[in-house]
Image (tube, helix red, strand yellow):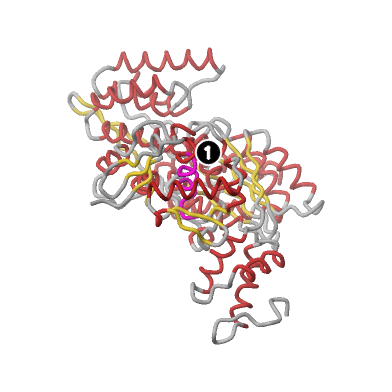
Amino acid sequence: MVEPLVRLLGPVQYVDSDGSVVELPSVSLRRLLGVLAVSGDQTLRAEYLVELLALSPGALRTSLSRLRSRIGEDAVHTEGAGYHLRCNVDSGRFTALLGDRDHPDPMTRIDEALALWRGNAIEEFRHEAWAEAWAARLDELRLVALEDRAELLIARGRSGEAVAALEAHVVANPMRDRPRGLLMEALAGDGRQADALRVFQQYRGFLADETGTEPSPHVQSIDLRVAARWREIDLSSDARLRTTRGAGWRERTRIEIPLARALEQAAPLIGRTRELAALEAELALARGGELRAVRLSGDAGIGKTTLLAAFARAPRGSSAAMLYGRCDEVTVPLQPFRSIVRAVVEHAPLSVIRSHAELHGGELLRLAPHLRNRTWVPDPIEGGDAIERFHLFEAIADLLRRVAAARPIALVLDDLHWAEPATLVLMRHLVRSLVGSPALVVASYCEAGDELATEVRAALADLDRAPIRRLELRGLDDAELAELATSLVGTDLAPDAASIAVVREQSAGNPRDASQLLLHLRDRRGPTGTSPPDGLAT
């Protein structure tokens, strides 16, 4: 006996506890199951499902009844005016395996994750609006897992197996940069240097014809290493290539930057499923070597930092170095970049720090005095504010490019509406400097009417030079507020639907304001758990 399971990694299916696939004869039933499965534990309001599925309320109730008759009454739970699924989903198992850093064998972990796939994600509905972002996210995670597996094969001296896997992967995904570099390494490791160099030339010609661009600096560095017959050449990444008799393998020092405390200690995310999926999709695109940007706006207390923290802690977010900086009312010059630069200087491999210092000396001492605890560097250049600022900005850009060469980065600038001018100028400088790097820039800010400073608006407009997505957070709905109430006061003291509706009206669904009202309501409830007769306002 196994636990019932909904499959999204292929055709949408329901697998019963005996392992058999339950027949869902109509497209509408499979679509309804898919929508509920994509939403996970989130309760979907009936009004939302009616609009999304283009059904009347009566037709929705009929579809739910038919679905329950097929998969079981307890599988779809009614909660208030909404519904959610009560069973496991294979995509959740897939992402959990990819994010399990404590697994004893990374290869086994990846093989188990890939074995869950039976076709394209959400196959029948992948091009519908409700499924598109999720399908793209799952597809990207699958491709990354395939590439991680090939990288492990190369590292374990199994280059021939890696070549066999990567050749088909490159044909199916000709625009992806990373597998081209891996294929070159695998061929060279298998003693086929000429074939590895030919792969680079073919890729270079393909990009020139299709996009007018060049391969990434990382792939170009692999070409030079292969041409030099795998002598140790360190150009931009922290990779070390060694050769053994008959098989080559690569040892890469992984750059690990701990999460900032503000992200690590943030409250659990409630709702925001689509916004989280959008952030993950943008990071997936950035991993391909394309600078991406996200503008995240919303009122104070709406949950921007909470969303960013959930993004950073998610398995997909953990695939990148999360570089987080925050502005506040205290106008400290370059405030968010101080914390970012200090974290990188403290935790980046020594070889990255030293190769950076060879070009830029001690410019980073202006923001990170502990740089000299890692390696000796000369004093920063002095020559007036403009010259000093230029050298500092170039040094920061170089440091971030070096980190991105070894691991994609997510540069998160929180509460940018408090930023002073130097921070905004540096952000604009980095947007230009990181073009061609696997980097995602996320700028969060409050925008209330015309109160956003002119300098901030200009910097955000400059951010639009990169491919950008705009996300605006709005208030939580009743189901999400009910979930928030349960997390704050527990199930026994959770308010009823009428009280939740009042909370929504008085707070406009703002999580911070709603939390205060809910705690106030809890404190005023009698020992029997009943609401006071005069409501919430007093």
**Quarter of the rendering containing residue 508:** bottom right
**Residue 358 visible in the displayed image:** no
Task: Check the image and report above or below for 466 versus 334.
Answer: above
Q: Which residues make up the magenta segment?
A: 31-42
Magenta stretch encompasses residue 14: no
- What amino acid is found at the position of numbered circle 1 in the picture? Ala
Secondary structure of the magenta portion, mostly?
helix
Residue indicated by mark 1: 133
Residue at the image position 53 percent from the left and 71 percent from the top: 488
**Quarter of the rendering containing residue 496:** bottom right
| Residue 528 percent across, percent down from the top left | 54, 85
Q: Secondary structure at mark 1?
A: helix
| Residue 13 percent across, percent down from the top left | 38, 40
Magenta stretch encompasses residue 33: yes
Front residue (pair 336, 233): 336
| Residue 208 percent across, percent down from the top left | 53, 14
Q: Quadrant of the C terminus?
A: bottom right
Front residue (pair 138, 371): 138
**Residue 126 visible in the displayed image:** yes
Task: Check the image and report above or below for 391 versus 306.
Answer: above
